[in-house]
Image (cartoon, helix red, strand yellow):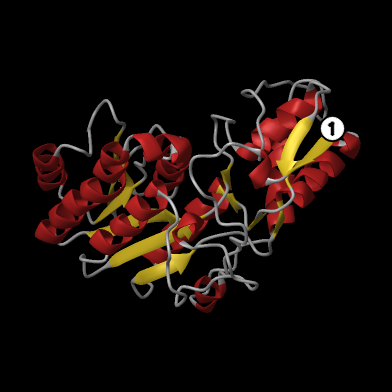
Amino acid sequence: MRVLITGAAGQLGTVITARAGAAGHEVVAFARRDLDVGRHGAVLSAVAEVQPDVVVNCAADNDVEGAEDQPARAFEVNAFAVRSLARAAGATGAALVHYSTDFVFDGRASAPYTEDDRACPQSVYAASKLAGEWFAADVPRHYVLRVESLFGGPAARSSIDRIVTALAERRAAPVFVDRVVSPSYVEDVATATLALLEREAAPGLYHCVNRGHATWFDVGREVARVLGAPADRLVPVRMSDLALKARRPAFAALSAEKLRRAGIDLPSWQDALGRYLRGRQPRGLQHPGSTSEQEAGPPGPA
């Protein structure tokens, strides 16, 4: 299978590129410097030249707060670029994989959202991602995968990494107590992506998250437990305590039952978190059996 990947230098794109290559697929990877997905003509030309069997779009503008001030940029990358990729994929007969987000929901549910639940975006970022979903669906064989609270990959810049860094440096780690999430480990998202393509699963919308859900505070406590760090460094924070421009869904848990019915059952978020942390080896804390160190970025509320 010939796979064209956009956003290949990003958190998810890096892992998808490596995993697809390791699985024996022919990979043509474009980082942003190689292909600006906001340029319609460049996208059409690149896809026409490569003639891929599948286009995997890992390019995204994930600046949730910044989107409120620069909505045009958010829609350019998260929506109109997807339209260009969809048209290019349709013209060459390729499948299209596109990643979306839990932010498309309003967060007022009390049970994990399914793919049949009505989207109701509450921010510019969320609206741009929902528009991208609609454009991706124009391709007959499309896979729109909603991921959430993504962690993993080489960059170590996720909310989980900020918690790890704060604990490792013996600083306070602010974490939300009023936001419920279903974290997604990039390695497991890559596994699910390739499985859907290789099995030629039914196209459509899928929630691609690890099993289960928790508040960010509970996620933080699990991080502390795995690392053997004092949990009293976790500082409970409410979203209303912060001057956030963009509204976040308070209850954002996603159900991955549809993905399981397709024969792809991702492990629990606790299992995924443990696998990630045991390999991450943060500075200041040592996992069982670890000897090396690695630094992450600055902490912030998760």
- Regarding residue 24, the answer to whether it shows in the image is no
Task: Bin the neighbour count of mark 1 within 10 Å (Cα to Cα): few under 14, some 14-19, many 20 and up.
Answer: few
Res. 142 image quadrant: bottom left
**Location of the N terminus (image quadrant):** bottom left
The x and y percentages for residue 50 are 16, 44
**Location of the C terminus (image quadrant):** top right
Kindly identify the residue that appears in the image at 86 percent across and 43 percent down. 225
The x and y percentages for residue 110 are 65, 72
The x and y percentages for residue 91 are 9, 58
**Front residue of this view, candidates 31 and 254:** 254
Kindly identify the residue that appears in the image at 48 percent across and 75 percent down. 262
- Regarding residue 266, the answer to whether it shows in the image is yes
Type of amino acid at the residue the image marks with label 1: Gly
> What kind of element bears circle 1?
loop
Residue 104 located left or right of residue 110: left
Using the image, determine if residue 298 lies above or below residue 137. Answer: above
Q: Which residue is mark 1?
A: 289
